[in-house]
Amino acid sequence: MAVLPTVPQYITVHLGRPDEAAENVTVAFTDYIKNVASNEIYPTWPEEAIKANILAQISFTLNKVYTEYYPSRGYNFDITNNTAIDHSFVKNGEVYDTISVLTDQLFNNYIRKVGRIEPYYAQFCDGKITQCSGLSQWGTVDLANQGLNYLEILKYYYGNDIEIVENAPVSGEIRSYPGIPFSLGSFGNDVVVIKRDLNRISQNYPAIPKITDLSGVYDRETEEAVRAFQRIFNLTVDGIVGKATWYKIRQVFSAVKRLSELTGEGLTISEVERRYTEEMSLGSEGPDVESVQYYLAFLGYFYPQLPLIAITGFFNEETRDAVFTFQSVYGLPVTGIVDANTFYTIEREYKNAVADLPANFQSAIGEPYPGRFLVVGDRGESVRIIQEYFNRIAVNDPAIPTIAVDGIFGEETKSAVMAFQRQLGIEENGAIGPAEWAEIVLRANNI
């Protein structure tokens, strides 16, 4: 029996021709389609034309993923950005708001031929400079202006024997949309899921009000939390959890949950010089190995190809396998040895991942999050800043102890952190991650 297609959470893009030595980047599937659409078409086009183009791009991409077009030929990526054979994709490229909103609505819909399983190989071209047997991008504008909707436009180019698969399942941890919108008066287990997810997200996005009643009834409190979430994430602010809002809640929840788990699973590192000194391989040990393990473990929470590993300071088989995977994903020689090129690529990708975190993780009211967890034994300006903020909080909150501002993360500072975590209702591990940092600075500056 054929396996039904699913929409991947992530997709790996090769920035060049298939046989060209070029960087591979792994991005969320929705972000990939938004990037492609923003490079291929214009946000000022009629909405029905934009929808038709986005669906063609989704279907073309999913066909490549479903058939494992590139992996089956020995490549370690899903698609390229070579416009002669695939889509235009620009790393860190601009995404237009209109296209972003429509992609959130359509990202797990695709075209298929009636009676077939696989996503349709929906070829397209601009219709002006290049011609093809598939969809004409500029032609969709003319058809939309004539009053055709996106399905009629797609049938015009691909035939009447196509259909749209809606709400296809998403692989990984993203629970599929139930198929009906939720609004004031809705009830059921899915409403409980929405409430719990929003409450967890609100720890990192304090503008989202807490929901106190966690029953299965969609009440006014839930509606206000949904509206706040929609405002933050550039969705239509209607207080209704439709498909786009559902998936955005699930995606953000997955992201913040993974980040909070970093400290809970011991993903910390003391202040060591993170610089390359010598090759590391099976049997190596010391702070340099610990640094590499930290980077890889952090990246493992964002890129499903990378296994989650323990930080031990000893280069064991688990670490070697993670290095193997990283080298394969990023187009490096697969040796299992951390040479200078591998080390600096790992370090660069770690820094890119930190830079791509939502604003609430990176900074809070002007104070930059240091990009790693602060723990007992750390020293420096970041520790001193957080100690000053704790003392400001302590003036009005007797549950938070006053501590010495010395830039040294000792047991006194750890106790203050644990008291603060107790108030947040999160694990009392004494480490300051992005969630704690943002809340501490926010609360101190609101005094």
Image (spheres, rainbow, N blue to C red):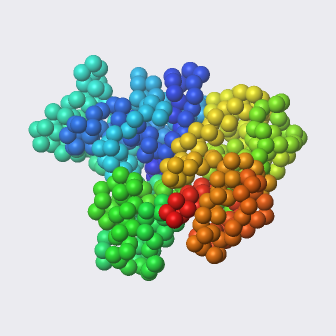
Q: In this view, does 343 lie above or below 445?
A: above
Within the image, what quadrant is residue 299 found in?
top right
Residue at 38%, 72% (x, y): give it.
Answer: 222
Residue at 51%, 24% (x, y): give it.
Answer: 16
Q: Given the current orientation, which residue lies at the most extreme top position? A: 129
Where residue 427 appears, as percent x and y from the top left, is: 66, 68
Left or right of residue 118, residue 20 in this image: right
Where residue 356 appears, as percent x and y from the top left, is: 53, 43
Q: Is residue 395 above or below residue 152?
A: below
Residue at 51%, 27% (x, y): give it.
Answer: 15
Q: Is residue 57 visible?
A: no
Q: Is residue 322 visible?
A: yes
Left or right of residue 20, residue 64 in this image: left
Within the image, what quadrant is residue 255 found in?
bottom right
Q: Is residue 391 above or below residue 434?
A: below
Where residue 269 appears, as percent x and y from the top left, is: 75, 50
Q: Given the current orientation, which residue lies at the most extreme left position? A: 146
Q: How many marks?
A: 0
Where residue 54 appears, as percent x and y from the top left, is: 32, 41
Residue at 34%, 39% (x, y): give it.
Answer: 96
